Image (cartoon, rainbow, N blue to C red):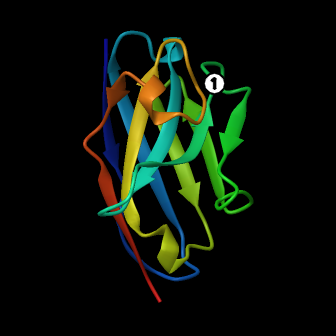
Amino acid sequence: QVHVVESGGGLVQGGGSLRLSCAASGRTFGSYGMGWFRQVPGKEREFVASISRSGGTTYYADSVKGRFTISRDGAKNTMYLQMNSLKPEDTAVYYCAADEDYNGRYSKAYDYWGQGTQVTVSS
C-alpha cells in the first residue's frame, strides 16, 4: 500500500507557472505507475498526465501537451507536475494517483489517491 500527498497548488496569473509535488510513502515508490488528474465542481475527474514506474513512458492530455511536464524522482519518492503557460481553464483541484499495475489515462484504474491541491489561474 502507498500513501500519496499533493502540494504546491495556489493562485497564479494566466501565463504563469506552478510546480505540483506528490510525495509517496509506504511501499517502494518505484513499484507504482502514477498520474495526475484534475476536477472542477460538477464535472468528472479529468486525466492530465501519467508516468510509468521507471519514468521512461509518459502520457499527456491534449489540453496540456507542450505546457505541462510530468516527472518523478526515486531518491525523493516524489512525482512532479511542472505547469507552464497556465490558463484560466486549468483551474481545478489536482489529484495525484498511484497504481501497481497501471499508468494510463483511466482514473478508475488507479487504487491510491491523494486529497488534492487547488490550482487557481486568474485571467
Name the spot of residue 65 as percent of width and height, x first: 71, 57
Q: Is residue 16 left or right of residue 22?
A: right
Name the spot of residue 25 as percent of width and height, x first: 32, 21
Q: Nearer the viewer, residue 37 or 57?
A: 37
Seen as rendered, the residue at the extreme left is 115
Name the spot of residue 24 as percent of width and height, x first: 36, 27
Name the spot of residue 106 as percent of width and height, x first: 53, 33
At 46% from the left edge and 17% from the top edge, which residue is drawn?
29
At 64% from the left edge and 59% from the top edge, which residue is drawn?
64
Asked if residue 22 is positioned above or below residue 46 in the image, the reply reads above
Report the quarter where the N terminus lies. Answer: top left
Q: Which residue does the numbered mark 1 point to in the structure image? A: 52
Q: The residue under label 1 is which amino acid type?
A: Ser
Q: Is residue 36 visible?
A: yes
Residue 122 falls in image quadrant: bottom left
Q: Nearer the viewer, residue 72 or 106?
A: 106
Asked if residue 40 is positioned above or below residue 31 in the image, the reply reads below
How crowded pointer 1 is (Cα within 10 Å; few <14, some 14-19, many 20+) is rated as many
Tally the marks.
Answer: 1
Q: Nearer the viewer, residue 54 or 103?
A: 103
Residue 49 falls in image quadrant: top right
Q: Is residue 77 visible?
A: no
Residue 10 falls in image quadrant: bottom left
At 66% from the left edge and 27% from the top edge, which residue is drawn?
55
Asked if residue 80 is positioned above or below residue 15 in the image, the reply reads above
At 55% from the left edge and 77% from the top edge, which residue is drawn?
87
Seen as rendered, the residue at the extreme bottom is 123
Q: Is residue 47 left or right of residue 5?
A: right
